[in-house]
Image (cartoon, rainbow, N blue to C red):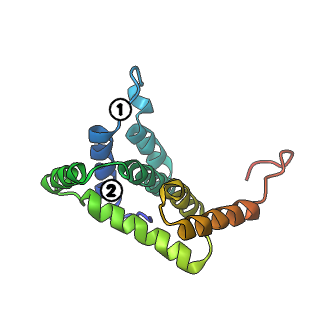
Amino acid sequence: MTIGSDEYDIMRAWSALMLEKRWQMPKGLAPESHPIACLDQIAASSTARARQGLSMMIGDLIEESSALSGDEIRQLDELFRQAKLPTLSDVRLRFHRRIKRILKSGKIKSEVDYYAVRSVVEGLSDDTERTQLWDLLAAYEGSIKPRDASAPPA
């Protein structure tokens, strides 16, 4: 899922609400270690990296939502509607469209796509799609050239 600069604030708010309602943050977590605080720290230096990080966070949230019942999804959808944010159902559909595009293209083209596929592959019930996605993940991982440890950082 690509997050455009024009939708970053909305999707950041969506993620914050989803985290608040669905995830149990570890007790004693320092405020600056909260995922949204970390995202804000990244955004202060690189909005492009923050959009990538937000996309990965949404992928994780979507993956976590796969275990929700229909009633839980409807309740969350209503909560998001009241907050004037995209519903969970809308975001899940958008995310799954990305997976379908990746399957259709037959190639993972970016790190964001890689993490989108990685976050859903284990939960797929369709054996054919799951096998195709595992193959695409392996091909992408094989195409990444390890950085020479003796070379200076880029």
Q: Residue 77 carries which label?
A: none
* Amino acid on which the number 1 mark rests in the picture: Gln
* Amino acid on which the number 2 mark rests in the picture: Met
Judged left or right of residue 132, residue 95 is left
Q: Please, is residue 39 above or below residue 85 in the view?
A: above
Q: In front of the other: label 2 or label 1? A: 1
Indicate the position of residue 75 as horizontal and vertical percent values. Answer: 18, 50
Q: Which residue is drawn at 35% across and 50% down?
A: 65
Q: Which of 35 and 152 is in front in this view?
A: 35
Disc 1 residue crowd, few under 14, some 14–19, many 20+, Cα 10 Å: few
* Count of numbered marks: 2
Judged left or right of residue 120, residue 107 is right
Q: Earlier in the sequence, mark 2 or mark 1?
A: 2
Q: Residue at x 78, y 59 (%)?
A: 145
Q: Quadrant of residue 134?
A: bottom right
- For the N terminus, the image quarter is bottom left
- Residue where numbered disc 2 is placed: 11
Q: Residue at x 47, y 73 (%)?
A: 100
C-alpha span from label 2 to label 1: 20 Å
- From this viewpoint, which residue is outermost toward the top? 28
The answer to whether residue 4 shows anywhere in this view is no
Q: Which of 95 and 70 is in front in this view?
A: 70
**Secondary structure state at the residue bearing disc 2:** helix
Q: Please, is residue 63 above or below residue 113 in the view?
A: above
Indicate the position of residue 53 as horizontal and vertical percent values. Answer: 48, 51
Q: Please, is residue 36 above or below residue 71 in the view?
A: above
Disc 2 residue crowd, few under 14, some 14–19, many 20+, Cα 10 Å: many
- Residue where numbered disc 1 is placed: 24
Indicate the position of residue 16 as horizontal and vertical percent values. Answer: 31, 44
The answer to whether residue 69 shows anywhere in this view is yes
